[in-house]
Image (spheres, rainbow, N blue to C red):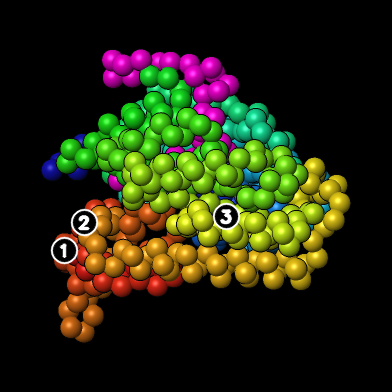
């Protein structure tokens, strides 16, 4: 090569680096992914630690007072470690409280103010301008492992549950276009996603605000509606003729939820429903401003199981809501005994600043809340253990999350999840003697050998 005629090498400017601390629920995680994707398109690089970052974004959660404390602590840590901090997310709506605790923050923006947060980064860490930086196509940033992805279908909520301030923080329901959601899902699957987790504040209300506006998708008229969405997601192909696992989260039990159960029975949709029932006692539900149709729900659970025997139902409950009597709590326990839910999360009621429930009379003393919480956890752990024990001896599909290193005998273990287990919130399947070629995202058949209260143990078929 004749170096004499070679043009002088162009040195690309170092890209400015952004660190991200993402707190809160999966919806906030999706927001963090969107912000980082935008910033990377603008020429920024990501920093995995505080030290290497030109600016640190803290995506906060402001749902409960304990979450706010955690958010303020995270902001404090980022300031101590880096010093240049921009705050966004749900707690961003309380800029005064943030600035009172941490006057050094560079900027505060609220939930979903993508433009503002990106602008704040541009202002406080101007992007390096280079001739090539903006021309390099980059895939979207994902904060979850490559094999599963959250798919956000709407923002906000039209309900007004008395313990919740999400409608105040995030506004009324605003649904995304069905074709945009499906395009994103298709792109994620093409990039290696094997499991889609559909999220929103109220998944079964999807499209109510747009009157279920229809769009053409693959030559078919497709409505912005949970059933159309579920059907189309079930038509995606992960490359072997099978659909990805698709889980529906935060499903409010409207009657039309019944329509997706046959899709589960057909194998197009993962037999899993996450329905936050919150309570069962009609009087507590009334004070929570939630629909009190718990008896009907029991009937519906039975009919869902008749159509799709393997359906796993996950739910969350609040104990110690103001005015909850011992009878109300016992009603909830009896209901749970009958409902036989697969997965249950429980929370002790905590007043949230600005929530209507704070004005309700008869707060439950903390010690009683703790006692009820412990009783509920004991009951649901027993139900879960019985349900998992019934799976011993069966062969179940398992998606692999992590493959270990060989032990001294050369055996390799792995951790995965059955169709009844959503990542982060449910149990796991611990595997022994897996093939060395196994990778995260593979879906394999596993014989279940043992179970405890939350997890399964098995070996590949
Ligand atoms: S449905 Fe969920 S997000 Fe909406 S108000 Fe009730 S608890 Fe909050």
Q: In the image, is the residue at mark 2 within 8 Å of ligand 1 by its beta carbon?
A: no
Q: Which residue is mark 2?
A: 444
Work out whether residue 336 can be spotted.
Answer: yes
For the residues labelled 1 and 3, say whether their Cβ atoms are less than 8 Å apart: no
Q: CA distance from mark 3 to mark 2?
A: 35 Å
Relative horizontal placement of residue 197, taking residue 436 as reference (left or right): right
Relative horizontal placement of residue 182, taking residue 71 as reference (left or right): left
For the residues labelled 1 and 2, say whether their Cβ atoms are less than 8 Å apart: yes
Check the image and name the residue furthest to the left. 1
* Snapshot quadrant of residue 95: top right
Relative horizontal placement of residue 460, taking residue 60 as reference (left or right): left
Tell me where residue 409 appears, x and y as whole percent. 18, 83
Tell me where residue 296 appears, x and y as whole percent. 55, 40
For the residues labelled 3 and 2, say whether their Cβ atoms are less than 8 Å apart: no
**N-term-proximal mark, 3 vs 2:** 3
Q: Which residue is mark 1?
A: 461
């Amino acid at each position: 090569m004749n170096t004499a005629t070679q043009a002088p090498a162009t040195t690309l400017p170092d890209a400015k680096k952004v660190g991200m601390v993402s707190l809160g629920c999966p919806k906030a995680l999706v927001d963090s992914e969107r912000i980082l994707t935008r910033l990377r398109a603008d020429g920024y690089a990501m920093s995995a630690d505080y030290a290497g970052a030109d600016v640190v974004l803290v995506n906060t959660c402001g749902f409960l007072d304990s979450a706010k404390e955690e958010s303020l602590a995270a902001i404090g840590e980022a300031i101590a470690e880096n010093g240049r901090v921009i705050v966004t997310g749900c707690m961003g709506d309380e800029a005064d409280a943030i600035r009172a605790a941490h006057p050094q923050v560079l900027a505060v923006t609220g939930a979903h103010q993508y433009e503002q947060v990106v602008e704040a980064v541009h202002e406080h860490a101007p992007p390096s301008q280079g001739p090539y930086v903006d021309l390099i196509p980059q895939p979207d940033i994902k904060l979850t492992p490559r094999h599963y992805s959250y798919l956000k279908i709407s923002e906000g909520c039209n309900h007004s549950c008395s313990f919740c301030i999400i409608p105040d923080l995030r506004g009324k329901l605003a649904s995304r276009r069905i074709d945009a959601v499906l395009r994103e899902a298709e792109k994620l699957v093409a990039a290696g996603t094997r499991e889609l987790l559909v999220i929103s504040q109220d998944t079964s209300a999807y499209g109510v605000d747009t009157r279920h506006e229809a769009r053409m998708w693959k030559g078919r008229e497709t409505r912005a509606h949970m059933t159309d969405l579920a059907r189309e997601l079930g038509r995606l192909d992960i490359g072997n003729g099978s659909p990805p696992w698709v889980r529906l989260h935060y499903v409010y039990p409207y009657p039309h939820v019944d329509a997706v159960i046959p899709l589960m029975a057909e194998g197009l949709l993962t037999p899993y429903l996450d329905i936050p029932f919150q309570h069962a006692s009609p009087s507590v539900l009334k004070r929570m401003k939630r629909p009190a149709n718990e008896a009907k729900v029991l009937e519906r659970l039975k009919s869902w199981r008749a159509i799709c025997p393997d359906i796993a139902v996950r739910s969350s409950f609040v104990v110690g809501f103001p005015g909850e009597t011992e009878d109300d709590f016992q009603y909830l326990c009896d209901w749970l005994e009958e409902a036989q839910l697969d997965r249950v999360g429980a929370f002790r009621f905590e007043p949230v600043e600005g929530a209507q429930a704070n004005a309700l009379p008869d707060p439950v003393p903390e010690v009683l809340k703790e006692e009820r919480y412990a009783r509920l956890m004991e009951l649901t752990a027993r139900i879960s253990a019985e349900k998992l024990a019934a799976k011993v001896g069966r062969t179940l599909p398992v998606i692999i999350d992590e493959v270990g290193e060989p032990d001294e005998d050369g055996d390799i273990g792995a951790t995965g999840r059955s169709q009844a287990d959503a990542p982060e919130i449910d149990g796991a399947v611990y595997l022994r003697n897996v093939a060395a070629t196994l990778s995260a995202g593979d879906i394999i058949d596993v014989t279940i050998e043992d179970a405890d209260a939350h997890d399964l143990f098995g070996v590949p078929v």
